[in-house]
Each structure stands twice: as structure tokens, then as C-alpha cells.
Amino acid sequence: MRPSGSAPEPERGAWVPLLAVCAGYFMVILDVTVINVAVPVIGRDLSASLTGIQWITDGYTLVLAGFLLTGGALGDRLGNRRVFCAGVAVFTMASAACALAPNAPFLVAARLVEGLGAALIVPGSLALLQQAYPERAVRARAFGLWGAMAGIAASAGPLLGGLLVSTVGWRWVFLVNLPVGVACLMLTLRHVERSPRRAGRALDWPAQCAVVAAVTLLVAALNEAGRRGWSDPAVLAGVGLAVLAAGVFVLRERLARSPVLPPALLRSRAMSGGAAIGLLFNFGFYGMVFTASLQFQHQRGFSALGTGLALFPAVAMTMFASVLSGRLSRRTGDRPLVISGMLLAGLGLAGWAAAGAAPDYALLVAPMMAAGFGTSFALTGSTATVMGAAPPAYSGAASALFNTTRQIGSAIGVALGGSLLATAGDYDTGLRISMAIGALAYLAAAGLAWRCVPAKAEAA
């Protein structure tokens, strides 16, 4: 017999919706990292300019970040399953176009379409999990596995990319998405229930255009800041225009009859605080991965594949941490898990910063494991906090908000890390400063979690 008060175990086959949703999310995150190893070879093969190479890498991320809120709003209006499946179909076809690209401009255009498909997939993924697993404890485990997909895909990207490029060629970096996309689409259509449509909710296109402009300009400016420096006129202009577009969005939202997210919902501590926590831990984790990748390759002489293996301890713990936090949340609530995860990750980056110049690689394994474990351990609780604060009618938009802030956090972490490596005088100093700032971001996230993440009694 099951102990009294314990959560019911899902029936056999009940995890198929999770498998379908996570397959789509896995493709999205994989394509953020897998391209980094392949792009030098792609550039040589297609005779791409430096600008073309940058757009092959960054164009996907820009469109993904910019259109997430639009994807969430479309899912809430048209049905999250319908928009999710449309995103998978667009992403899969765009991946095929990337694989068949005859030249660099064609590949850049296909990558932009791929990013649009990804922006339709990500908000619907969390909303569909919220729909498929209404029982809180089971949903927490599902969110944990969803979060683990990010770490697994991020870690598999460099390894898979290096393996494919060195064996069958760079076009297979995109072709591997085809069977995954087809399987994801079939599983979703067969095993995920239809989502309710709210056709009466109008899409506020001026607000959507404003938020697309704000996020795209900000991420583009941050990407350029890592290369040009923070005082470059183009970077300052991009940030200024992003702030202006954000102001237009806020003003429009206050006047709109059907806002993307109601102002009262945005004023919720759980919603806004959970989104800010996502920004901070993505800032710390992806800033660490980026700066460490450059340091391993440029200072230690590791190959691209060797760098992926060297970073593996940082992401090897993500699956275990996500599953563990999903199981523990029903006993402890989300707040202790988010706080302890952020403190552990902060301790890991602080330990790296304190390890001295050019420490032995063995001394870096524990800090990387702590950062990877802590980030993934906190992701489940912060995801549940944001999604739990939103009514079902706004689940897609809430998911989009959370993932948009995380994308912005990643962009800031990479941009700041790149700037520090370029201006600190040497890679070791820049990396240690970057790790120290990342540790402070984790500590700030822990403080936010104390105030914003509901305790177990509140959540119940």
C-alpha cells in the first residue's frame, strides 16, 4: 500500500507526454551549443565572412529570445499543443534547410526560421507539462526532468558537434534534428491532450512588436559587447533602443484590453521574483561555461572535443540534481531547494575564483560540479514557482516570461565574460573576476528566493 499522504505514482505510459515535450525542448537547447564547434568548419566550407559566421551562431539565439513572449501568447490563444506542434514542424523543416544550405546567406536565413520554430516550442513545453500533470508532486518531477534537458543538451552539444564534424561532416549537426523532430511531433499528437483555445483573447500586436524589438535589440547589443566592448557606439545605441522599446511595451500593456501578462500578475512576487532568479542563475552558469571554454582552448590548448569533455563535470550532475529536486519538493517545498542550490552554485564559482592563477584541472572539477548541481537543483523550484503563480489561461505567457529572462541572463553572462577576458590583461585574471561576479549573482538569487519563492505551506 502507498503511505498515507504520498503522491500517487503515474500509471505506465503516463510519462509519454513528458518524453514528447522534452524531445522538442532538447532540440532547441542542443542547437544553441552544438553549432559552436561546427561553425569554423562551416565558415570554411561555405566561404562565409566573419559577419556571416557570427549570424550563423547568433541569429538563432536572437530570434529565439525575441519571439518567446509572442510564442507564449499564441499558445494561450490558439492552444498550446497546436502552437507547440507548429513550432516542432517549423524547426524540423528549417533544420533540413540548414543541412542542405548551398551558401552562407541561405544558412543564416534557415537558422533564423529555426529560431522562430524554437520560440514556438519553448513556451508551450512548460504549459503542456502543467496541463498533463496537474498533481503538484508529479508535476514537480516533470519540471525537474524538463530542466535536466537543458543541462544534458548544453553538455551534449560540444561533444556531439565535435564528433559529427570530425566523422560525417557539419551538415549532420542539423540532420540529427530530423528524426527527433518527427518522433516528437508523432508522440505529441498521439499522447498529449488538446489544449483549450481562447479565441476571444485578442493578440496585442503593437505590444508584441515592442517586446520583440526590446529583447532582440538587447540580446544583440550584449552579444556585440563581448566583441566590441561596452563603450562601443553600436552597443550603447542597441541598449538605448532596447530600453525605449521596453518602455513602449510597458505603456502599451497598461493601456491594452488584453495584455500579454496582466499587470497584477507581473506584480506578483512569485512571478517576477522567479523570473529574476532564472536570469541570475543563467547569468552565472552560462557565463562560467563560456569563459571556461575559452580559457581551456586558448590557455590550456584543449581541442574543441577536449573542451567539451573538460566541461562535462559542470553538466554531468544536472540530470541527477533535477530528478532529486523534483522528488524532494513535495516534502520540503520549493524555497529550501532553490536557496540551497543557489548557495552551492555560488560556493562553487567562489571556489574557482579563489583557486589562484592557472590551477590544476583536478582542482576545478569540484567547483564545476557544484555549479552544475546547484543550478539544476534550483531550476525545478523556480520553474514551479513561476508556473504556479500563473492561472491556466496565462500558462504559455508565464513560461515565455521565465524563458525570456533566462535567455537574457545567458546573453549578459556571455557578454560580460567575453569583455572581462578581453580587458583584464590575461585570461586567468578575467576568468577569476568573471567567476567571482557569477558567485555574487548566485548569492543574489538565493536572497531573492528567500523573499519570493513560496514556502511549502504557502504553495499548498
Image (cartoon, rainbow, N blue to C red):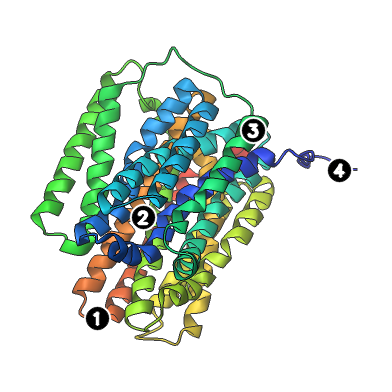
How far apart are labels 1 and 2 at the CA level?
23 Å
Sequence-earlier tag: 4 or 1: 4
Q: Nearer the viewer, residue 225 or 38?
A: 38
What kind of element bears circle 1? loop
Taking 217 as reference, is 75 left or right? right
Question: Would you name the residue on which mark 4 appears?
Answer: 2
Between discs 2 and 4, the one toward the N terminus? 4
Q: Who comes first in sequence, dot 1 or dot 2?
A: 2
Crowd band around label 4 with a 10 angstrom C-alpha radius: few (<14), some (14–19), many (20+): few
- CA gap between label 4 and label 1 equals 59 Å
Name the residue tied to disc 3. Answer: 132
Q: Amino acid at mark 1?
A: Asp
Task: Please give the name of the residue rendered at 68% of the width and 34% of the height, measured from the top-left corner.
Answer: 135
Q: In front here: 140 or 111?
A: 111
Q: Check disc 3 and report its element: helix, strand or loop.
A: helix
N-terminal of the pair, mark 3 or mark 1, is: 3
Q: Which residue is mark 1?
A: 426
Who comes first in sequence, dot 3 or dot 4? 4
User: Which element carries disc 2, helix, strand or loop?
Assistant: helix
- The mark that comes first in sequence, 3 or 2, is 3
Instruction: Find disc 2 in the rendering and name its residue.
Output: 410
Query: How far is mark 3 from mark 1, CA to CA?
Result: 50 Å
Query: Is residue 23 positioned above or below 441 on the image?
Result: above
Q: Is residue 458 visible?
A: no
Residue 368 on image: x %, y % = 49, 71
